[in-house]
C-alpha cells in the first residue's frame, strides 16, 4: 500500500501533466503517408522527451518516426525482467483536437454536465452511467467542440507521474523500465515502426477505459477487399449483355449474414463489417472487416466469402471478382495465457490500489496485441477515460491518481519478492 504523501504526489503530478498534454493538438491523420501522420504529434513528443530528461531517465530518444523511448535503471539490488510501459501520443481523427480547453467540474453533484463553448451539448448519467460512481469527486471534460484526449494522454500522464515518483521516493523499488510513447495508434500504425530492441521483456499498454479495466484478450482480425469487374453497355441495348458490377456488389453485401454485424453483436460474438462500398457498372469495390475472438471462426467467415464469390460468378456470367485478404492482427490471449504472471501481477496491482478489477475482452485491437506477438507479453490496463472519441469524453480526476498507483504497484510487484503465486500449468 502506498502512503498518503505518495498518493497525493501522484495525483498532483499526473493532473498537472495531463492538463498540459491535452492542450496540444495531436490528432492523427489516416490519409497521411508521413511518420508520424500529423505534425502536432511532434510537439507533444518533444515535450515528453524534455520532461523525461528532466526527471532523470537515461537513453531518452525521439526517433525519426516520432517514437519516444527512455530507460529507468532498476533500483539498487533489483534484478529480473525489464518492464515496458506504453501509451500513445495521438488522439482520434474523428473529432477536432484543436484548442482543447480542459474543464474541471468540481464536486460533481450527479446531474447534467454542461460545456462552456457549446450551449447545446450536455453529458448526463443516462448516457454515461459510470458518472454516478464519482459523485462528490472532480470530473474533467473538454469545453465543447473538441474531444478531451484522455485517450491516451491520461495514460501518458500516469506513466510520467509514476516515473517522477520513483525519482523522488527512492524506497519505491522497481525493475529496469523501458518507456515508449507511440504515434498513430488511432490509425492502426502504433507499432509499425517500433523498435523491439528498445523494449523490455514484459509490457503494459496504459490505454484502457474505466478505472479497474484489465484486458488480456482482443479480436482476431482480417480485412477483405473485393473488386467486382463487370461490363458496361449502352442501357438501350444492354439485355443479356450488361454486367452491372455496382448492383451486383450491393447484392453481395446483402447476402452476408445480417445478424453477424457490429450493430447486431456483442461480448464474444464475431462479425462481418462493411466499411466501404463504391462503384459503377464496370467496377465496384467493397471492404469488409472480419472479426472474432477465435481464429477458426474467422477462417469459416473467409470460407463463406469465397463460396459466395463462386456462387456470384456462376450466377452473373461475365462477372469477375478479385479478392485480397489481409491478416491484420491476432488475439493476444494466445501469448498471454503462456505468461499468466503478466496479467496476474496487473490484477494484484489494481487490487492494491483499492480498485475492483474489471476483466474485459477488447472488441478491437490494441498495440499490446502486436507487441505480444513480437515477443513481449503486453496486457492493457486502464487509463481512466470514458465516452472516448467524442466531444463528451470525460475522466474522473481520481483516475489519474489510481492509474499512476497501479503502475507503481506493478513495478513494486515485479521488483520485490512479493510476486503473486504463479500458475504455470499453461506453460
Ligand atoms: Zn487509445
Image: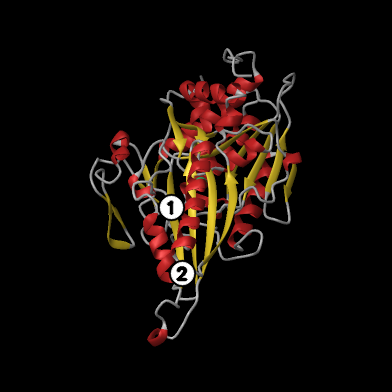
How far, Cα to Cα, is label 2 from label 1? 15 Å
Q: Residue at x 43, y 62 (%)?
A: 315
The numbered mark, 2 or 1, whose residue comes first in the sequence reads 1
Above or below, 275 relative to 8: below
Q: Is residue 129 shown left or right of residue 163?
A: left
- The spot of residue 61 in percent (x, y) is 73, 48
Q: Residue at x 40, y 53 (%)?
A: 256
Residue position for label 1: 273
* 314 and 233: which is toward the camera: 314
Label 2 crowd (10 A; few <14 / some 14-19 / many >=20): few
Cβ of mark 2 under 8 Å from ligand 1: the answer is no
- Residue drawn at x 51%, y 47% is 302
Q: Quadrant of residue 355?
A: top left
For residue 359, side relative to residue 44 (left or right): left
User: Percent from the top left, x then y, of residue 281?
Assistant: 45, 76
> In the shown orientation, is residue 82 left or right of residue 155?
right
Q: Are marks 2 and 1 in contact (CB under 8 Å)?
A: no
- Vertical arrangement, residue 273 with respect to residue 251, above or below: above
**Quadrant (top left/top right/bottom left/bottom right) for the C terminus:** top right
Q: Residue at x 40, y 59 (%)?
A: 253
In the image, 84 versus 269, the foreground residue is 269
Q: Is residue 15 visible?
A: no
| The CB of the residue at mark 1 lies under 8 Å from ligand 1 | no
Nearer to me, 149 or 381: 381
Question: Residue 233 placed where, x, y %?
Answer: 46, 83
Judged from the image, the secondary structure of the residue bearing numbered disc 1 is: strand
Residue corresponding to mark 2: 278
Q: Is residue 212 above or below residue 262?
A: above
> Which numbered dot is residue 150?
none
| Residue nearest the observer in this picture, 140 or 285 | 285
Local crowd size for mark 1, using a 10 Å CA cut-off: few (<14), some (14–19), many (≥20): some
Amino acid at each position: 500500500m502506498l502512503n498518503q504523501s505518495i498518493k497525493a504526489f501522484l495525483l498532483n503530478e499526473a493532473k498537472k501533466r495531463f492538463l498540459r498534454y491535452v492542450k496540444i493538438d495531436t490528432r492523427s491523420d489516416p490519409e497521411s503517408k508521413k511518420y508520424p501522420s500529423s505534425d502536432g504529434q511532434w510537439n507533444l513528443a518533444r515535450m515528453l522527451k524534455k520532461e523525461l530528461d528532466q526527471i532523470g531517465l537515461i537513453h531518452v530518444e525521439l526517433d525519426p518516426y516520432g517514437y519516444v523511448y527512455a530507460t529507468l535503471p532498476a533500483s539498487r539490488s533489483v534484478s529480473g525482467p525489464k518492464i515496458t510501459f506504453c501509451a500513445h501520443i495521438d488522439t482520434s481523427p474523428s473529432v477536432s483536437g484543436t484548442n482543447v480547453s480542459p474543464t474541471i467540474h468540481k464536486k460533481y453533484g450527479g446531474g447534467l454536465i454542461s460545456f462552456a463553448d457549446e450551449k447545446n451539448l450536455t453529458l448526463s448519467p443516462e448516457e454515461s452511467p459510470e458518472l454516478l460512481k464519482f459523485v462528490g469527486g472532480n470530473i474533467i471534460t473538454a469545453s465543447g467542440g473538441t474531444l478531451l484526449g484522455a485517450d491516451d494522454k491520461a495514460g501518458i500522464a500516469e506513466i510520467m507521474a509514476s516515473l517522477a515518483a520513483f525519482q523522488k521516493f527512492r524506497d519505491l523499488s522497481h525493475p529496469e523500465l523501458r518507456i515508449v510513447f507511440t504515434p498513430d495508434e488511432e490509425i492502426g500504425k502504433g507499432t509499425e515502426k517500433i523498435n523491439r530492441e528498445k523494449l523490455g521483456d514484459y509490457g503494459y499498454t496504459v490505454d484502457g477505459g474505466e478505472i479497474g479495466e484489465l484486458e488480456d484478450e482482443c479480436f482476431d482480425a482480417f480485412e477483405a477487399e473485393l473488386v467486382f469487374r463487370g461490363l458496361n453497355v449502352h442501357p438501350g441495348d444492354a439485355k443479356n449483355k450488361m454486367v452491372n458490377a455496382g448492383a451486383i456488389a450491393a447484392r453481395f453485401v446483402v447476402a452476408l449474414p445480417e445478424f453477424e454485424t457490429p450493430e447486431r453483436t456483442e461480448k464474444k460474438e464475431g462479425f462481418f463489417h462493411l466499411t466501404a462500398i463504391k462503384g459503377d457498372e464496370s467496377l465496384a469495390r467493397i471492404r469488409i472487416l472480419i472479426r472474432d475472438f477465435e481464429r477458426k471462426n474467422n477462417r469459416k467467415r473467409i470460407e463463406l466469402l469465397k463460396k459466395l464469390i463462386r456462387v456470384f460468378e456462376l450466377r452473373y456470367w461475365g462477372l469477375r471478382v478479385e479478392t485480397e485478404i489481409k491478416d491484420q492482427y491476432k488475439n493476444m490471449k494466445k501469448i498471454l495465457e503462456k505468461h499468466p504472471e503478466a496479467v496476474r501481477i496487473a490484477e494484484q496491482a489494481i487490487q492494491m490500489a483499492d480498485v475492483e478489477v474489471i476483466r474485459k475482452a477488447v472488441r478491437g485491437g490494441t498495440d499490446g496485441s502486436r507487441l505480444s506477438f513480437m515477443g513481449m507479453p503486453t496486457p492493457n490496463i486502464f487509463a481512466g477515460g470514458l465516452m472516448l472519441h467524442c466531444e463528451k469524453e470525460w475522466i474522473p480526476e481520481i483516475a489519474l491518481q489510481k492509474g499512476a498507483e497501479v503502475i507503481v504497484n506493478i513495478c513494486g510487484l515485479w521488483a520485490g519478492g512479493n510476486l503473486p503465486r504463479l500458475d504455470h500449468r499453461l506453460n
